[in-house]
Amino acid sequence: MPALTVAEDGPRRLLPGALKGTMVLAADGAGAVGHAVIQLARWAGATVISTVSGSEKARVATVAGAHHVISYREDDPAAEIRQVAPDGVGIVAEVALGANLALDLAVLRSRGTISPYANDGGKPVEVNVLQA
């Protein structure tokens, strides 16, 4: 039998409790993708942090189930996320990679995962890949 792709195997790996102990950052928790990320991550047992642009959107992310909601327009969102997740977040579900990459890298734990869904027409993204 051939190996399954992530997309084919994903539903079997994302089960209730599968993300227990994992901190997940859902970018734009008030948007459609962020909203779905919050709900799926909660269902799988993760602690969910969401970034939003203001108080109205914070209410939407909270209703979706985010444990912690942080405005990226106020103060220092990286410091606020690090207060909630001092060891960093394990998974970032990103909808605006170019705009948010610096924040994502500032809060990502060692060996964490950034899963970009889109780049929101934002700035180009360059990633250095080191060879061992």
Image (tube, rainbow, N blue to C red):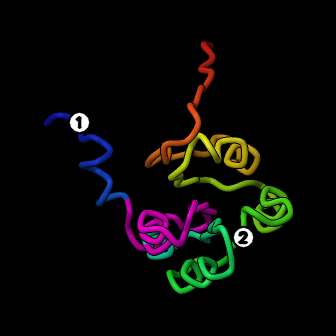
Disc number placed over residue 3 in the picture, else none: 1
**Considering the image in quadrants, where does the N terminus appear?**
top left
Callout 2: 10 Å neighbours few (<14), some, many (20+)?
many
Q: Return the residue nearer the eye: 14 or 62.
A: 62
Residue span colored magenta: 14-39
Q: Position of residue 46 (x, y in %)?
A: 56, 69
Kindly identify the residue that appears in the image at 63 percent across and 68 percent down.
Answer: 52
State whether residue 30 is above or below residue 2.
Answer: below
Q: How many marks?
A: 2
Give the image quarter of residue 128.
top right
Is-magenta flag for residue 66?
no
Is-magenta flag for residue 27?
yes
State whether residue 123 is above or below residue 74.
Answer: above
Q: Return the residue nearer the eye: 99 or 6.
A: 99
Q: Residue furthest left?
A: 1
Kindly identify the residue that appears in the image at 72 percent across and 42 percent down.
Answer: 102
Quote the CA–CA distance across marks 1 and 2. 39 Å
Camera-near label (1 vs 2) is 2
Disc on the earlier residue, 1 or 2 = 1
Where disc 1 sits, the SS reads loop
Kindly identify the residue that appears in the image at 30 percent across and 59 percent down.
Answer: 12
Kindly identify the residue that appears in the image at 62 percent across and 13 percent down.
Answer: 132
State whether residue 10 is above or below residue 131.
Answer: below
Q: Position of residue 89 (x, y in %)?
A: 67, 56
The residue pinned by badge 2 equals: 70
Q: Return the residue nearer the eye: 39 or 33.
A: 33
What is the three-letter code of the residue carrying label 1?
Ala
